Image (tube, rainbow, N blue to C red):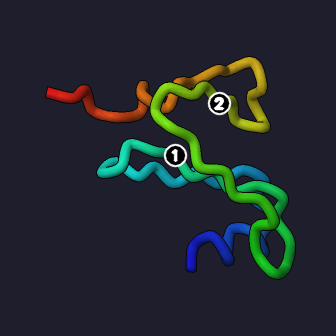
Amino acid sequence: MKASIYAKSGIVDYWVLDVNRRKLHVYRLPSPQGYQSETILAENVEISPLVFPDCMITVREMLRPIA
């Protein structure tokens, strides 16, 4: 439900962190019908927010360390 609202509002970059599966869902290309792009990234992948392209973040940095 949030993704649809964010897309309709023009939020260009929407991330959902799946802490159980240690993956990041990245939604981009908003439209009135919802996001047109979804990418699922593993914990070892780097990404940068569209509005801060020089800020590289590894998905693992957003997750708790594995005990």
Spot occupied by residue 2 in the image (x, y as percentages of width and height): 57, 73
* Horizontal and vertical percent position of residue 20: 30, 51
Horizontal arrangement in the rendering, residue 53 relative to residue 15 (left or right): right
Q: Are marks 2 and 1 in contact (CB under 8 Å)?
A: yes
> In the figure, 46 relative to 37: above or below?
above
Task: Give coordinates of residue 29: x percent, y percent.
Answer: 84, 58
Name the kind of residue labelled 1 in the image: Leu
Q: Could you tell me the amino acid type at mark 2?
A: Ile
Q: Residue at x 65, y 54 (%)?
A: 14
What element does badge 1 sit on? Answer: strand
Give the class, few, some or many, for how many residues have Cα within 10 Å of label 1's Cα (few <14, many ≥20): many
Q: Quadrant of residue 45?
A: top right
Which mark is on residue 48? none
| Residue to which mark 2 is pinned | 47
Q: Residue 56 vs residue 19: left or right?
A: right
Indicate whether 27 appears above or below 35.
above
Q: Secondary structure at mark 2?
A: strand
